[in-house]
Image: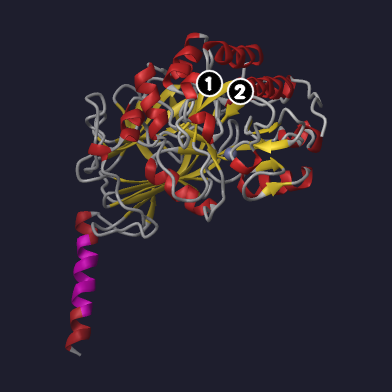
């Protein structure tokens, strides 16, 4: 009995508190009153953020879930601010359109920038933003795209020093064009709210390279991630969000490579449907030397980009040779210099005839030659490869796993206006965070203008030439 009376007393007190304090938890309430110092008050379930205006919602919030829908015009961008006084706090970006290096919908601006949007211009889409303790999550169309846990000692540049959790207002800021929001629903969460889905360890930002690039809005994209060796798409999603690296996930289309291979157009479309709603860029790798004859350009064209490498060649005696396998590398009858010349010939042929956007695992050499990498990659040979990249607007991958090409070659490529991508070519779920690529950016002075994006793809206009005899 005592217990029951106590419960009633608590319930009565809670109700009273609810009436006097006006703070109600775990109940969705419309966020439908916004003020702007010049334009006054806007009431209602729909509000448009025009370029240059900021609207503040009523109330202050700490832990919360905010849901709603947004509609972007072409090239329009807006930000939803939270924990803000107009200057401080975090922003979530609303911008759609092709992958051109601008941050996209759902980005936690300059902390977790995203480069592929799961929404489209001219079509209402759902979003959810939640703060639970130190964790911020963002979902677009029911897919989680950001799961960021603010560490004890966050790294922030001077410009972004205010990007910290605290408590504060929610605001809508128009940046360009018109972005309209509707049906905003705010649910306050209690102080001890926890995001159960946040399972990975916090990043130590004092010793993390990626956050330094994010803070400068320098796109951090790993275009060469394979779902193999136990790496599932769910793991890749969690790792990508935790590290702050956008992943371009690519299957191998063709034969002879390591792990799952797509064999025909039908498998290409099946794979594409599996990953299209995941928050990844969607790539495909042409594998072996027959892929141009096996797949239609239409099927491979559904992906955001296509890459190939020159690690499978037809050797000087007409044998198919995977040069990453020592048992398939034969120098019989030729010197290593002659072998190297043949490898460069093959590389030029591949890049000339196979319509790839990106030359991946570039300048890779078999072990015995790799020991004298700089000696075998003479200026003349490097120029032959760079010439063909320039001629067909092919990007050069900076490969994190093999640490290739050398910084010297990257500098030469930059001087010739060649664009770059970053890629790992992982074998399993245990791989790094683009360390070599980020080092190359610093040491070679690469800027955003040196990066390639899928909007620069010209492969669909290129003719496929069947050139090797098998
Ligand atoms: Zn690969």
Q: Is residue 197 magenta?
A: no
Toward which corner of the image does residue 217 lie, by quadrant?
top left
Residue at 71% from the left image edge and 32% from the top image edge: 301
Residue 340's disc is 2
Q: Give the structural element (helix, strand or loop) at label 1.
A: helix
Is the residue marked by circle 1 packed among few (<14), some (14-19), or many (20+) residues within 10 Å? some
Q: Which residues are magenta?
A: 7-17
Is the residue marked by circle 2 packed among few (<14), some (14-19), or many (20+) residues within 10 Å? some
Question: What residue occupies the far front of the structure in this picture?
Answer: 333
> In the picture provided, is 314 more to the left or to the right than 190?
right
Camera-side residue: 40 or 430?
A: 430
Magenta highlight: main SS: helix
| Residue 297 visible from this viewpoint | yes
Q: Give the structural element (helix, strand or loop) at label 2.
A: helix
Q: Is residue 14 magenta?
A: yes
Residue at 74% from the left image edge and 20% from the top image edge: 462
Q: Residue 17: where, in percent of width, then height?
A: 20, 61
> In the picture provided, is 386 more to the left or to the right than 48?
right
Toward which corner of the image does residue 388 lie, by quadrant?
top right
Q: Quickly name the residue at label 1.
A: 376
Q: Residue 406: where, in percent of width, then height?
A: 45, 23
Camera-side residue: 156 or 396?
A: 396
Q: Residue 369: where, in percent of width, then height?
A: 53, 29
Q: Earlier in the sequence, mark 2 or mark 1?
A: 2
> In the picture provided, is 201 more to the left or to the right than 378?
left
Judged from the image, the quadrant occupied by ligand 1 is top right
| Residue 95 visible from this viewpoint | no
**Placement of the C terminus among the 4 image quadrants:** top right
**For disc 2, does the CB lie below 8 Å from ligand 1?**
no
The reply to whether discs 2 and 1 touch (Cβ–Cβ < 8 Å) is yes
């Amino acid at each position: 009995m005592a217990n029951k009376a106590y419960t009633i007393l608590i319930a009565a007190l809670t109700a009273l508190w609810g009436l006097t304090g006006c703070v109600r938890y775990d109940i969705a309430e419309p966020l439908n009153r916004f003020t702007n110092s010049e334009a006054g008050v806007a009431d209602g379930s729909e509000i448009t953020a025009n370029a240059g205006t900021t609207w503040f919602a009523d109330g202050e919030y700490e832990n919360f879930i905010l849901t709603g829908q947004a509609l972007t015009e072409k090239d329009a961008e807006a930000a939803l601010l939270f924990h803000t006084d107009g200057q401080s706090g975090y922003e979530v970006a609303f911008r759609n359109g092709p992958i051109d290096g601008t941050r996209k919908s759902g980005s936690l601006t300059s902390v977790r920038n995203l480069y592929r949007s799961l929404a489209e211009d001219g079509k209402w889409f759902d979003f959810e933003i939640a703060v639970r303790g130190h964790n911020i999550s963002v979902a677009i169309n029911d897919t989680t795209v950001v799961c960021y846990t603010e560490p004890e000692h966050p790294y922030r540049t001077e410009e972004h020093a205010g990007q910290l959790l605290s408590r504060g207002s929610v605001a809508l800021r128009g940046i360009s064009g018109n972005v309209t929001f509707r049906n905003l629903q705010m649910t306050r969460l209690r102080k001890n709210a926890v995001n159960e889905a946040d399972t990975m360890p916090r990043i130590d930002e004092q010793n993390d390279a990626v956050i330094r690039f994010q803070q400068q809005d320098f796109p951090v994209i790993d275009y060469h991630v394979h779902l193999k060796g136990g790496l599932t798409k769910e793991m890749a999603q969690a790792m990508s969000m935790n590290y702050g690296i956008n992943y371009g996930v690519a299957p191998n289309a063709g034969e002879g490579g390591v792990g799952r291979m797509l064999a025909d157009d039908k498998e290409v479309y099946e794979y594409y449907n599996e990953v299209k709603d995941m928050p990844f860029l969607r790539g495909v790798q042409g594998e072996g030397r027959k892929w141009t004859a096996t797949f239609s350009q239409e099927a491979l064209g559904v992906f955001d980009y296509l890459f190939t490498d020159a690690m499978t060649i037809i050797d000087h005696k007409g044998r198919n040779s995977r040069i990453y396998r020592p048992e398939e590398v034969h120098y019989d009858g030729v010197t290593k210099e002659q072998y190297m010349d043949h490898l460069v010939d093959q590389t030029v042929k591949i890049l000339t005839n196979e319509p790839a956007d990106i030359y991946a695992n570039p300048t890779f050499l078999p072990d015995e030659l790799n020991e004298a990498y700089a000696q075998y990659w003479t200026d003349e040979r490097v120029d032959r490869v760079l010439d063909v990249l320039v001629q067909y607007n092919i990007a050069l991958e900076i490969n994190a796993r093999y640490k290739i090409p050398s910084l010297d070659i990257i500098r030469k490529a930059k001087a010739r206006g060649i664009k770059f991508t970053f890629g790992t070519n992982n074998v399993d779920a245990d791989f790094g965070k683009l360390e070599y690529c980020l080092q190359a950016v610093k040491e070679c002075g690469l800027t955003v203008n040196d990066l390639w994006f899928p909007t620069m793809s010209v492969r669909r206009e290129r003719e496929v030439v069947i050139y090797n005899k098998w």
